[in-house]
Amino acid sequence: MLLHIPAVLQGTRLAQAQALLREARWIDGRATAGPQSGAVKSNLQIAEDDPAGAALRDLVLDGLAENALFFSAALPRKIYPPLFNRYGGAMNRFGKHIDNGVRLIRHGPLRGQSVRTDLSATLFLAAPESYDGGELVIEHSFGEQRVKLPAGDLLLYPGTSVHAVEPVTRGERLASFFWVESMVRGEDQRRLLFDLDRHLMGLREQLGETEATVGLTGVYHNLLRQWAEA
């Protein structure tokens, strides 16, 4: 499932994030790459121990915590602390790669914990008209998907996907990226729960708390109890 989640960051929170990106200390992005992805990666990242990066992580995690669509789709058990990258100039692309199946958290209060990368996420932080190129290209069962979203919007996609970032030929592409270990490991089960939850929300808006919506809510939570690893 590829899901566009609008306005994870917006208004003051987005402006704060963009200001912090200008203050941050940037290093070679290969510092966090595995052997395969490191061979095709050419970008910059904010150093994981940089104070601006810590403030940015808090902004992103606060935005995610308030976003019901993200929770419904991801059912997060663990979120790898968000990282931040920049594409432009000579450091302008990331060739085809697949993310590591498990990531070890190396900094912060969760240091030493591992995160199974069920879902990958890219949060766009630069206005799309401010740069050329830089599309996130994802291969999946329906073909190749090319994505370039407004600043503050997030794309959630399977961690199993082969993906790439097209070369940036003008301006700078700024983004946050991270991984999610879901309470529901199976992609098909997670998709069924997401579809059921969204339809339930639509029924509640139309009908209110009827006997049918209460009963279907019970079905949702009973499936979640059966499938979740909390």
Image: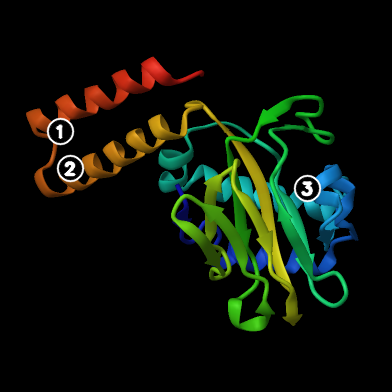
Query: What type is the residue that disc 2 sits on?
Result: Arg
Q: Secondary structure at mark 1?
A: helix
Residue 116 seen: yes
User: Which circle's residue, 3 or 2, is located before the other in the chain?
Assistant: 3
Q: Residue at x 75, y 29 (%)?
A: 110
User: Which circle's residue, 3 or 1, is located before the other in the chain?
Assistant: 3
Query: What type is the residue that disc 1 sits on?
Result: Thr
Q: CA distance from mark 3 to mark 1?
A: 42 Å
Rendered location of residue 45, percent (x, y)? 83, 57
Report the disc number at residue 213.
1
In the image: residue 120, left or right of residue 103: left
Q: Residue at x 52, y 42 (%)?
A: 65
Residue at the disc numbered 2: 204
Report the disc number at residue 54.
3
Instruction: Estimate how packed mark 1 is, as few (under 14), some (14 to 19) or many (20 or more) residues with alpha carbons within 10 Å.
Output: some
Rendered location of residue 156, percent (x, y)? 53, 50
Rendered location of residue 135, percent (x, y)? 62, 69
Instruction: Estimate how packed mark 3 is, as few (under 14), some (14 to 19) or many (20 or more) residues with alpha carbons within 10 Å.
Output: some
